[in-house]
Image (spheres, rainbow, N blue to C red):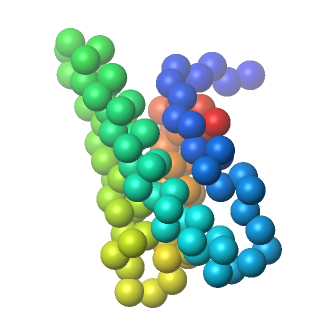
Amino acid sequence: MPRWDYTIQAKDLFSHSQDDEEEDTKIALESAPIIIGRIQRLIGTLRKQDKLGDKDYIIEALEWVIDAFEDVKDVNGDPLEAFNEALTLLYDAGDEHRIWIK
């Protein structure tokens, strides 16, 4: 069983998603900046803990995820697709760096 070192709360924002693409797009647009803030808080925590610079690789991965969530509102195409791609990056980063996405 994996051991998680950190947690990012995200599922509470979109767990009530419907099979309504318009509503899901609205949820994605509202949730993306909140998730960005939560990731930024974790980055702040990591920077405080990081006396030797050994958490830089985690911070860099999370900054890539933030960029992806920022694309949700800036994308010329489909914000819902961009949100789903950002979530995939978040879950991948979580798996790689032992961050539980709750």
Q: Residue 13 at what x, y percent from top left?
A: 61, 50
- When asked about the image quadrant of residue 28, the answer is bottom right
Compared to residue 90, the image places residue 71 above or below, namely below
- The residue at 79%/74% (across/down) is 19
Q: Is residue 10 left or right of residue 71?
A: right
- The residue at 72%/62% (across/down) is 17
- The residue at 41%/55% (across/down) is 33
Residue 79 visible in the current orientation: yes
Q: Nearer the viewer, residue 52 or 76?
A: 76
Compared to residue 12, the image places residue 56 above or below, namely above
Residue found at the very far left of the displayed protein: 52
Q: Nearer the viewer, residue 21 or 43?
A: 21
Q: Is residue 74 left or right of residue 52?
A: right
Residue found at the very far right of the displayed protein: 19
Residue 95 visible in the current orientation: no
- The residue at 65%/46% (across/down) is 11
- When asked about the image quadrant of residue 52, the answer is top left
Compared to residue 30, the image places residue 53 above or below, namely above
Quadrant location of the C terminus?
A: top right
Q: Residue 54 at what x, y percent from top left?
A: 27, 21
Q: Is residue 35 left or right of residue 11?
A: left
Q: Residue 94 at what x, y percent from top left?
A: 53, 39
Q: How many marks?
A: 0
Quadrant location of the N terminus?
A: top right
Q: Residue 101 at what x, y percent from top left?
A: 60, 38
